[in-house]
Amino acid sequence: MLTGSKTTFKVRQMVPDMKERMLSQSGVNARSRDMFGLRCLPGECVLQRAVLVRKKLTAREGGGWLSGTLFCTHFRVAFVPQDSPKPDDNADPVLLGDHDVALASIEKVVAVGPSRTKLVTPNSSLKFTPEELVLYCRDLRVICFLFDRLTPDTQAVEITYTIAKTYQPLKSGTVLSFQNAALGSVEMKQFLSNRHRDAHMNWFESSADWEQELERCRATGWRVSSVNDRFEMSTSLPRFNVVPQKVLDTELKKTFAHFNEGRIPRWCWRHPRGSDLLRMASFQNNIYHEKDDTRNLELILFGVQSSLCVVVDLGEEMPSPTDIQLAHSRLRALCLGDISSSVSVPDDKWLSTLESTHWLDYTRCCLRKAAEVACLLRGGHLTTVLQESEDRDMSCVVSCLVQVMCDPHSRTQVGFQGLVQKEWVMGGHRFYSRLNHHRDNDKEEAPVFLLFLDCVWQLLAQYPSRFQLTGDFLLALHDSVHLPLFSSFLANCQRERCKRTQHQSQTYTPVNGWRDVLPQGASPDPSDAPLPSVWDWALQYSRERRAHFTQPIAPTPPLQPLLNGNLNTNPDTHRLSDTSPGSVFLLSRGSFSCPANLLPWRSGSSGVYKKSHRRAPSSENLPGLERLLKAWALTEGPQGLASSTMGPQGPLDPYEPLLPLLLGPCVGVWKECYLRGALHAQAFSHPISSNHPHPVEQLAWEVQQLKDKLASTASTDANPPSKRAEPRRTDSNLNQNTNNGTFLFPASRSQGLGVTRPVAPPTSTNLQTSRALLPSSAPVSRPGHKDSSGSSKHTFLFGHASVTEARQDQRYYPMPNNSKLTKSNGPSLGS
């Protein structure tokens, strides 16, 4: 009887299968196929379908298995739960549903049988009926589908073959065909042409956008130059760049040849205390420097400052793109695992293997360098210039991290999107080469942008209440990088985006030079689909998913210049009457120096670099670098003793940099991103009754119970019946070694008059978010104890968000000593 019922079921399934093939071949519209429960995009065709399929849910989705129907189109693998509501025909189309995966994101297809597994390729053949279908994705997801025993064998085999043959083969032109599969229909092109951009976001595509940023930062003395409007001066720089007002465009044109790829020093951001952040490429030493060129070069390099310039070298200390690519590949292999091979990492060696990937080392290195620059900018009135050989990789990372640390606007969703648009998209990062969607340039591939997102997540994990954006937003942006559908990530510079959008070609004339023109009578290629921006989140995610991108935060007060004791940082009163530039220092490997070849034109006939081009008229008005750092370390801040009245939300000054803790346990693994597929890769099994959960799920449940008890205990201990005074302890640097002091890590200092503030307990509204952001280990804080010399020693084991933010009054003392990156004590699994 069972055999007969299964045969009858197979016969009944033949009718829908035949109907599905007829629909896919005839190319009917999406509404005609809504009877199958899947709402297709305009022009999207269903290639294969399998019924009675179960999808393995991640721990974030609640765990367990979800029953439904599996579809494969020429754009995505879609899963429709059996109890999902009927799709709304009048709603705007969404590219991917909550349970869908784009074909371009799939890296490997694995079929699991009763006694074997097989890596399925377009040319392979299956000699068994798969029971499980595992999709390994480029965005570190592992998606598992289980075929029910009543699923027709032909459907299980055919949908496995179909996915393997259509999931982005490694050949040229596949990205374009993939784009046309999603966006190439007439209906979809018309829908995209009617989309409106986010009016609240700064796109940095026009001169008015840059003027708006200058006004927001109160950056006087700067102007927007359109000298590169036709990309004649530099092909990788944007049309508009911010330069000092005192440098004319005619003088500016002579300076492009002195820098690699013509990437001159240009303004990025101004700190409220008057310091400016600039970016530039390395100097061209083989260029002859005329007297007028030298003057213009120094005017641009110093910006609106005339006293002090610090060039931050990013070449020697920061990881190279090759290093980042190798570390990310090792991290992928460790986190994803591989069910198709028998090689696996034992549990007792997992953390040591993670450390050997060096991914967390590179994350610490980027955060440390950004914290150094943030301290320089916060310290006073100077120009800080980030210098990289080509100014297109690590300078993007450091400049963005500095602004995230110092500017509350950059920690909102709109501000962060504008920051990425300014420093990465318009800044000329090689997204096309680094992401390598076409698989045609493996030597240039390096996920530099993904390293930056990891660094931002580390800051978010340590300071969750200082961010409006959430981990869900960063995860969505991480996944969007692997989807070759967005104009933001499919070009190396603004010039390439303009050429693709306007279908331009280049002509050369002796008078006008190279110009991009549209050929006469040319028309856009109808097969070339219009590409939306990655910031059009409504096109990618449902309203429910987008609701988790932000959290409410207190409004940031308007940016105002701050006064700090004798250190007057008002740019209008602090500017010198003499415009000749002053001292230039090089910050490299944590120490300052004045190398003779820093500015090639200054090491002329004498060959000796002058430490100070001229003496400052007053050391009070124009402090040197050592005095500047000392004044920064000794000051109590603009609040003074009023800091004792501060609450747990942190200091009154919202522009105090969020300096990260970089000890081994404080820098954790982005579990929501890197480990979301690890459970599936390590523990495949058929669904078990809810009364007998899988041992791994049982262990996860027990760990969660322990975390809840710890949170409850912490909230009880955080509200003592009476406050007790704590003796004021001497400042101790957490990352200071025995030989020299390291720049930038927090010293343990009590609040104001030495009163210990209670730690705010987690509330019901943010408990779930806090669990996702906090390290999995419990916070442990050991009181300082005196050694024989009388110095205070402190040990910090694990970071906790509430504890970290309750100590916002800690001062961070930059020490101009020779220091190196402190070795970590081993990684931690931060949630």
Image (spheres, grey):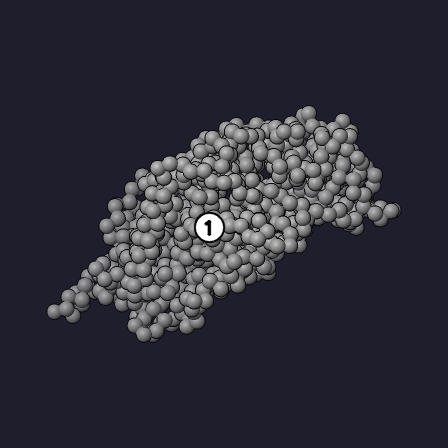
Name the one closer to the observer, 671 or 376: 376
Q: Is residue 161 left or right of residue 325?
A: left
**Between 633 and 532, the one nearer to me in the picture:** 633
Count numbered badges in the picture.
1
Which residue appears farthest toward the right when viewing the image?
A: 605
Q: Residue at x 55, y 36 (%)?
A: 656
Q: Residue at image x 44%, y 56%?
A: 829
User: At which x and y percent is residue 82?
Assistant: 24, 53
Q: What element does badge 1 sit on?
A: strand
Image location of residue 523, percent across then percent down: 54, 43
Q: Is residue 377 visible?
A: no
Circle 1 packing at 10 Å, graded few (<14), some (14-19), many (20+), is: few
Q: Answer with left or right where residue 817 lies relative to residue 612.
A: left
Most distant residue in the top direction: 573
Q: Residue at x 67, y 42 (%)?
A: 385
Where is residue 602 drawn, in percent x and y? 81, 44
* Residue 276, above or below 683: above
The quadrant of the image that shows the N terminus is bottom left
Q: Amino acid at mark 1?
A: Arg
Relative to 125, is 257 on the left or the right? right
Q: Residue at x 77, y 33 (%)?
A: 616
From the image, tell me which residue sits under label 1.
Answer: 782
Where residue 266 appears, x then y in whole percent?
Answer: 66, 39
Residue 304 shows in the view: yes
Q: Quadrant of residue 215?
A: top right
Q: Is residue 218 above or below residue 254?
A: above
Q: Farthest residue toward the left?
A: 1
